[in-house]
Structure formats: structure tokens, C-alpha cells
């Protein structure tokens, strides 16, 4: 058996503990990377906490987008952080992050980017004892070796990795799976609508108006990834299923997930700037698929499934499914994620977790929940 898989089987991957008590008196220093849809909502939530006491003990000392950064050891006012960046001449550079965080107390990076360059630094920061809290799936939801590098680094660094916002935008999905495992359960299967944007699309698409129009609305509302093909291709859901599977102790490689993309090859081949004009390529095939499901009294849902097979191997699939209206995954509204988990104790009836699974506000809340969990131990 591969060593990584063995390690996954042996221990529930609770975040590595660290002694919160030793940091209790010092302020936790935060670096926020990304000030777009999610990062902007993190700043707004921090600013809204000013008089509530939640922000006591937190100090934002570094903020950056892809172009500029701004650091201040005395702290940055979250409500003016974006203006500060707009006027900054300090170039963005990831080497500046540990320098800006230097000092006593917890050091925490909040990754609100979709950047592979930032994700590639997670392990390095964790190894230095810097906690990482992320909305970006790239470090945990891609190659198994990268997932393992994060695990090893947080163990060596005594640091913690907050990933609640990577799947379900902060819904208690990963936490529930880890708690079931910590309670001695084996996970048998997980099935879910894991993409808030695709949930929104298939909750709203009526087979009459063009599907491309719904995609644009979802993107403009901030529900989709910056490039909507990441959602429509199933890539984003594949990453989420990999993160859930690994939390369940199943060491899947990316290629082990069978993904049925909604993106035609011609659309997949375009550069990002040309995607919007080409979205109507989606319309005719989707109209056809919808009409077929409608005739059978079924609903279209984009579903991810992980299932233990009889030989103890695993089957992992992502794609559009036609579901009868009473199916546990057919319900929900808006951007709701809906996830069913079967384990030793939930054999016949699965544990069902449902709620909004996309959007800046809930994602930012999930990130800051992880920050507070680290700070309060
Ligand atoms: N939107 C949602 O509902 C949602 C839900 C769950 C998870 N997420 C995840 O949250 C992350 C951010 O999504 P978003 O919708 O907020 O994207 P976004 O609006 O495009 O914002 C991305 C931000 O990251 C910045 N950035 C890129 N590279 C950077 C670097 N090397 N250093 C510092 N900053 C960098 C960008 O800078 P510029 O401003 O200079 O371009 C921008 O401010 C993604 O990983 C996404 O998968 C989003």
C-alpha cells in the first residue's frame, strides 16, 4: 500500500494541534492575500467587527492583491485597506509575507486568491509555524503529493490549516467528516451537489431561456469561479470531491475521479478573454438535456459521488445527473450545497448537510471562523 494512503487510513486529518495558550496574550497578526470578491468580504466582515469584540486580539498587518501590497506593523484599518492598496507603490511579492507577519503571537495567512503561486507557498509557511486559512482549493484539491506536503509541513511546523471555505463555502462538511472519523466511524460514501454556482444554475435554468444567460448572471453575482469554465468543466467539483475524500481518509489522485465536463472542446480551447462571447455554445446541448429530463419528470443536478466498492476500492464520479424530484440531492434552492454522508453509524439513512455553498459573505465567514478557531485554540 502506498505510504500516503496508509497515513490517510491511520489518522483522521484533524489540523495539527499547537499550544494556543502560549499565544493567548499576544495579538494574532493577519496577512490577507486577495482583495477581490471573497477578500473584499473578509475586509468588510473584519471592519464590521470593530465594536463587537470579535476582532479583539486580531491585527491585520499585511494586505495584497496580484499587483500591490501594503504592510503596517501597527495594523491596517480593514475599512480602508483597499484604498491603501490602490495608492500603494509596494509591489506584491510573497517573500514579504513572513516578514510582515514577524512578531509574537499567532501568524496567520488568509488566502483569498485563486493563485497557484500562492497555493505553492502554503507548505513553506506552515513549516515556518505560520497558520494558513484558505478559500483556494489548489493546495489540497489537486495532486495527492501537494496534499501530503501540506500535511507534513503543518505537522513539522506545529501550525494549522483552515480549509472550511474550500468546500461548501464554510458549511460544516469537512468538520463533520473529520468528527465522524475521530469518533471511530469509517466513511462508506459521500454524494453531493458541491458547486454553489452549478446548484444555482440548475435551480434556475428553465429550458426556455438560454443557459448562457444564466451562466453570466451567476458569474456577475460572484457565484462562479473567476473563469466560469472551471465550474462548468467539473474541475472545481473534482477538487472539492478530492478534498472531501482525503478528509475521509481516501487518498485519491486527480485522475481517479471520472469527470463528465459540460464544456464543449471548442469552448475549452479558448483564451479567457474570448470565453464570454462563446458561452452560447452551451445553449443547444443543455436545452436538449433539460427537455429529456423534463419528459421523464426528472431534475438536472450536477453531482459528485464517492463510493466504497465491494473490494474496498473507491469509485469517484462527477457529472450531470437526472434525479427524481424526491431524491435527497434534488432539493435545495439558490446556491445551496447538499451533501449526503454514509458512515458506520449512518448506514441506512445518510447524514444530510445543506446550505448556501457559494457567495462572498459565507465564504469570508468560513475563512474568519477558521481564523478564530486558531486564535482561540
Ligand atoms: N466567490 C465565491 O463564492 C467563492 C466561494 C468559495 C471559494 N472561493 C475561492 O476564493 C478564492 C477567491 O475567489 P474570488 O471570487 O474572490 O476571486 P477574485 O474576485 O478574482 O479575487 C482574486 C483576488 O486574488 C488576487 N491575487 C491573485 N494573485 C495574487 C497573488 N499572487 N498575491 C496576492 N493576491 C493575488 C487578485 O488580485 P487582483 O485584484 O490584482 O487581480 C484578486 O484580488 C478562489 O480560490 C475561489 O475558488 C470563492
Image (spheres, helix red, strand yellow):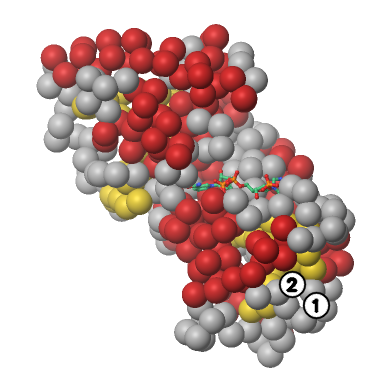
Q: Is residue 142 visible?
A: yes
Above or below residue 366? Residue 51 is below
Residue 33, x across and y down, in percent = 69, 56
Please identify the quarter of the rendering in which residue 57 is found. Answer: bottom right
Q: Say few, some or many: other residues with alpha carbon within 10 Å of mark 1 (under 14 / 14 to 19 / 20 or more).
A: some
Instruction: Give the position of the C terminus as an image quadrant.
Output: bottom right
Q: Which of 261 and 328 is in front in this view?
A: 261
80, above or below 136, in the image: below
Q: Which of 178 and 281 is in front in this view?
A: 281
Within-10-Å neighbours for mark 2: few <14, some 14–19, many 20+: many
Pointer 1 or 2: first along the chain = 2
Residue 61 image label:
2
Residue that badge 1 annotates? 73
Q: Which image quarter holds the N terminus?
A: top right
Q: What element carries label 2?
A: strand
Q: Are marks 1 and 2 in contact (CB under 8 Å)?
A: yes
Amino acid at each position: 500500500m502506498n505510504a500516503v494512503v496508509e497515513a490517510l487510513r491511520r489518522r483522521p486529518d484533524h489540523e495539527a494541534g499547537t499550544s494556543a495558550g502560549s499565544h493567548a496574550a499576544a495579538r494574532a497578526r493577519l496577512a490577507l492575500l486577495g482583495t477581490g470578491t471573497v477578500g473584499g468580504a473578509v475586509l468588510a466582515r473584519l471592519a464590521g467587527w470593530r465594536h463587537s469584540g470579535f476582532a479583539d486580539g486580531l491585527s491585520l498587518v499585511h494586505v495584497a492583491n496580484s499587483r500591490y501590497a501594503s504592510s503596517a506593523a501597527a495594523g491596517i484599518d480593514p475599512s480602508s485597506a483597499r484604498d491603501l492598496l490602490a495608492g500603494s507603490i509596494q509591489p506584491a511579492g510573497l517573500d514579504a509575507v513572513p516578514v510582515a507577519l514577524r512578531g509574537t503571537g499567532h501568524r496567520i495567512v488568509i488566502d483569498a486568491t485563486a493563485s497557484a503561486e500562492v497555493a505553492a507557498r502554503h507548505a513553506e509557511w506552515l513549516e515556518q509555524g505560520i497558520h494558513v486559512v484558505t478559500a483556494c482549493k489548489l493546495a489540497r484539491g489537486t495532486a495527492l503529493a501537494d496534499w501530503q506536503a501540506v500535511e507534513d509541513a503543518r505537522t513539522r511546523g506545529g501550525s494549522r490549516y483552515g480549509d472550511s471555505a474550500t468546500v461548501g463555502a464554510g458549511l460544516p462538511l469537512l468538520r463533520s467528516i473529520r468528527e465522524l472519523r475521530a469518533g471511530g466511524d469509517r466513511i462508506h460514501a459521500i454524494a453531493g451537489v458541491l458547486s454553489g454556482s452549478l446548484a444555482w444554475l440548475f435551480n434556475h435554468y428553465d429550458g426556455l431561456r438560454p443557459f448562457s444567460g444564466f451562466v453570466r448572471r451567476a458569474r456577475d453575482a460572484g457565484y462562479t469561479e473567476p473563469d466560469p469554465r472551471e465550474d462548468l468543466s467539473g474541475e472545481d467539483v473534482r477538487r472539492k470531491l478530492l478534498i472531501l475524500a482525503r478528509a475521509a481518509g481516501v487518498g485519491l489522485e486527480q485522475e481517479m475521479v471520472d469527470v463528465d465536463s459540460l464544456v464543449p472542446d471548442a469552448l475549452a480551447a479558448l483564451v479567457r478573454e474570448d470565453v464570454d462571447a462563446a458561452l452560447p455554445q452551451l445553449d443547444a446541448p443543455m436545452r436538449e438535456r433539460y427537455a429529456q429530463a423534463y419528459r421523464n419528470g426528472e431534475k438536472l443536478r450536477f453531482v459528485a459521488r464517492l463510493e466504497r466498492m465491494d473490494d474496498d476500492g473507491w469509485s469517484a464520479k462527477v457529472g450531470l445527473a437526472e434525479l427524481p424530484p424526491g431524491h435527497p440531492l434534488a432539493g435545495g434552492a439558490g446556491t445551496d450545497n447538499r451533501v449526503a454522508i454514509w458512515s458506520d453509524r449512518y448506514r441506512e439513512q445518510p447524514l444530510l448537510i445543506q446550505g448556501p455553498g457559494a457567495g462572498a459573505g459565507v465564504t469570508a465567514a468560513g475563512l474568519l471562523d477558521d481564523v478564530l478557531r486558531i486564535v482561540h485554540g
